[in-house]
Image (tube, grey):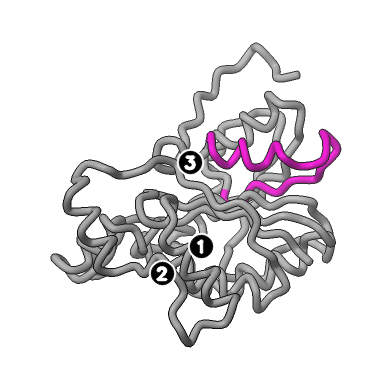
Amino acid sequence: MIDDRFNPDPKPQAAPGVHEKAIEIFLTGKGIDRNVLDLPCGEGAMALSLLEKGYKPVCADIEPQHFKIPGLSCEKVDLNQRLPFPDHTFDDWICIEGIEHIENPHHLVREARRILRPGGRLIISTPNTLSVKSRYFFLRFGYPVHFDLMMKKEQEIGGRLTIQHLNPISFIELRYILDENGFAVGRIEANKFERRHPLRNALISRLLVPKRSLKQDSPEEGALRRLLASKVLLYGEILLVEAIKK
């Protein structure tokens, strides 16, 4: 039970709907005894949702001073470094608004492989750089939606000023990194769908994305190509990918 004497009001540091969709994916797991890591945990909005459902997450963030949940500790952890957890510690790792902020996405997935138990899940969110909206935005401005010119110092993290979004990682690259490190992709969801320009979107999707396999495709390539033509990858704003350790 959560202590009714406090009202921390932690705010999700993610786009609307991301936390709710992550919880939905997480709850397809196997019972209340799952050992879950919430990293980066921000102010603790995800941790509060997990507490309300009976879980007690392990929380960590590069700026633990912003954590707002009494009764839970928050360890200072830098996703660019080796994580301070033993091998095979967790059943699940919920990583919201993390991978696009770090220097090396491959390192994050390798660490997930190390700290998760066999069958463990990495639930990860990142802006959908392959959406029709993001492709159109890139055509106009030269960078995907949710990214920028990477010239100004945007925020202070861990005592130093840094650019907020470092890596516009596409689903194609993320799937490759996961596969190379022994993960199978499970559910692929989005926080919401962008359909504000249906005629433009329909034209761009018809021009850019084959709905069928190409002649030279292997079965695996054909399956991936069809996935790239799916609603979630063409119109989803923020992707949430469930990866299962083999």
| Residue 99 numbered tag | 1
Q: Position of residue 224 (x, y in %)?
A: 52, 69
Q: Which residues are magenta?
A: 20-40
Farthest residue, direction top: 4
Q: Position of residue 137 (x, y in %)?
A: 20, 61
> Which residue was labeled with disc 3?
18
Q: Position of residue 25 (x, y in %)?
A: 63, 42
Q: Position of residue 107 (x, y in %)?
A: 61, 74
Quadrant containing the N terminus is top right
Between 61 and 34, the residue placed more toward the observer is: 34
- Give me the C-alpha separation between circle 2 and circle 1: 8 Å
Disc 1 on helix, strand or loop?
helix
Disc 3 on helix, strand or loop?
helix
Label 1 vs label 3, nearer the camera: 3
Q: Is residue 139 left or right of residue 147?
A: left
| Residue 167 numbered tag | 2
Between 190 and 105, the residue placed more toward the observer is: 190
Quarter-of-image position of residue 194 = top left
Q: Is tag 1's residue or tag 3's residue first in the polypeptide sequence?
A: 3
Quadrant containing the C terminus is bottom right
Quarter-of-image position of residue 84 = bottom right
**Which residue appears at 24% of the width and 68% of the height?**
207
**Which residue appears at 73% of the width and 50% of the height?**
92
Quarter-of-image position of residue 175 = bottom right
Residue 27 lies within the magenta run: yes
Are there few (<14), some (14-19), or many (20+) residues within 10 Å of tag 3? Answer: many
Q: Taking 243 as reference, is 217 above or below it?
A: below
Asked whether disc 2 touches disc 1, contact meaning CB atoms under 8 Å apart, the reply is yes
Q: Taking 224 as reference, is 9 above or below it?
A: above
Name the residue type under label 3: Val
Residue 103 lies within the magenta run: no
